[in-house]
Amino acid sequence: MLQVWALDGIREITPGDDLVRVILDAVDAAPGADTALQDGDIVVVTSKIVSKAEGRIIRADDREDAITRETVRLVASRTSPTGHVTRIVENPLGIVSAAAGVDASNTPEGTVLLLPVDPDASARRIAEGLRSVARVGVIITDTLGRAWREGQTDHAIGAGGIHVFEDLRGTTDAEGRPLVVTQPCVADEIAAATDLVKGKASRRPVAIVRGRGDLVGDLDLPGARSIVRNPERDMFRQGADEAYAEGFAAGRAARA
Amino acid sequence: MLQVWALDGIREITPGDDLVRVILDAVDAAPGADTALQDGDIVVVTSKIVSKAEGRIIRADDREDAITRETVRLVASRTSPTGHVTRIVENPLGIVSAAAGVDASNTPEGTVLLLPVDPDASARRIAEGLRSVARVGVIITDTLGRAWREGQTDHAIGAGGIHVFEDLRGTTDAEGRPLVVTQPCVADEIAAATDLVKGKASRRPVAIVRGRGDLVGDLDLPGARSIVRNPERDMFRQGADEAYAEGFAAGRAARA
């Protein structure tokens, strides 16, 4: 049985706040003895409050400027009939997403939030702090769109003390043949599960997942950075229109 | 509180099996009164057993042939240094995935499984049958890889009697501004959550999700087909190498 619940009563986070303290206070305030942190629990934190605690809030009258500054590589862009430009970009963490993780919701007017500088380090730090109470793993999440599918789901952008993949390589199926699907990204699946209890409009930025203590491990396990595919290995490292345009220019030049 | 558990004791499924009966028998055999199906539960079924029940098992000495036959459109392909070809294709359901959903694991030697012909119809049929007991929603899942990220996660490829998106359009944040992220794909998040309890190597192809009864609705709600992005709207409808090559050829021709 997997149990997933969100912590209530987490106040607005401001720069310098100690998230370990905030989480432990919210756990203590939760009703019921079985909601106390236990060994093997996974604590899932929305990146927004990590960014706020780490002071990653900047003045930006123009969100587009902030996106440009957070962009390492433009992957694709498209202009809607109304003139709105959607940019899919790679951010300094290697994550491909719309708007480089720049977030203008639930922030004071005239400011935007950037993603944590190193969410894996943040997750490890929070896990280390929480381990004064129980041996938990920590995942930091962001909401990301996907290729080929409408809508968004929550993904892991930081991880500390938890296996991000369930490694089934070498496992065989019931007929004794090797499994072809080999690497379930359990960190992303855990992130997705917690979005079902956190809500987007409400202030419930922390959730607990109980029942997969087998995934919790040492603090020096690889972080969520290991989920990011190297662009060289990525068949979709660039949008189709952008790649076509580059090819077209090269084809013209090749004749010249 | 969200609760997620898998049903034990589901036997090997063969063509013609009544999945409604199979699921209800497994529910009845589960220990504990609170595991009986309740209104608002979401029943999540791996596509593999739906395919088997619907007889979508075909003789195929060559899995590659089966993939070719299930391919509506080649999206991208890549040959590894060892000569293995990975094909990302669009299947008849519009779903972009490796191998068109053709599955050769946990099938008798010399055969492969194809995806259900119409997983939304299958999900609605199962939901309708289960509603003789409780008003549940049904999701049918498949394991899919992703652009930009390593590993696989489970996704919804069929849905019956459940909202596949949580519609937050028009919702405002705590500061009263419209939320930018507007359409969490809850069906994919539910699919991902259940992969955490189903396991890949074990025979636990059905899971129950309890705690989001608000998502359960009429049987004529849009299915998982509505999650598939129209290729015309998709910036990643073609692999970067393929688009570049097309552009290159067009650029050469334009000079000629």
Image (tube, coloured by chain):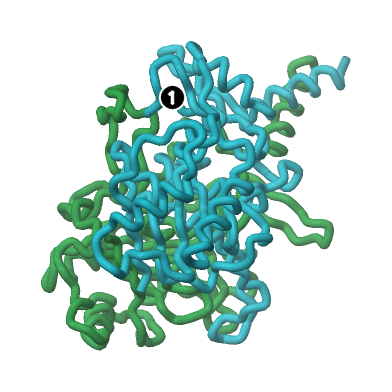
Chain colours: A green, B cyan
Asked which quadrant contains residue B208, the reply is bottom left
Asked which quadrant contains residue B211, the reply is bottom left
Q: Residues within 10 Å of mark 1 (few under 14, many from 20)?
A: many
Residue at (25, 87) in percent of width and height: A31
Q: Where is residue B59 in the image (x, y as percent from the top left)?
A: 51, 16
Q: Where is residue B122 in the image (x, y as percent from the top left)?
A: 58, 46
Q: Up-down: is B146 above or below A187?
A: above
The amino acid type of the residue labelled 1 equals Ala
Residue at (49, 31) in percent of width and height: B15
Residue at (63, 21) in percent of width and height: B69
Asked which quadrant contains residue A219, the reply is bottom left
Residue B5 visible in rendering: yes
Q: Quarter holding the C terminus of chain A?
A: top right
Residue at (25, 88) in percent of width and height: A29
Please state if A192 lies on the left or on the right of A79 as rendered: left
Q: Where is residue A7 in the image (x, y as percent from the top left)?
A: 33, 79
Label 1 marks a residue whose chain is B
Residue furthest left as drawn: A132
Q: Up-down: is A13 above or below A220?
A: below
For label 1, the SS is loop
Q: Position of residue B9 (x, y in %)?
A: 29, 45
Please state if B228 lies on the left or on the right of A7 as rendered: right
Please state if B28 lies on the left or on the right of A58 as rendered: left
Q: Which of B77 and B43 is in front in this view?
A: B43
Residue A224 visible in rendering: no
Q: Which of A202 and B177 is in front in this view?
A: A202
Q: Up-down: is A105 above or below A3?
A: below
**Which residue was labeled with disc 1?**
B104
Q: Quarter holding the N terminus of chain A?
A: bottom left
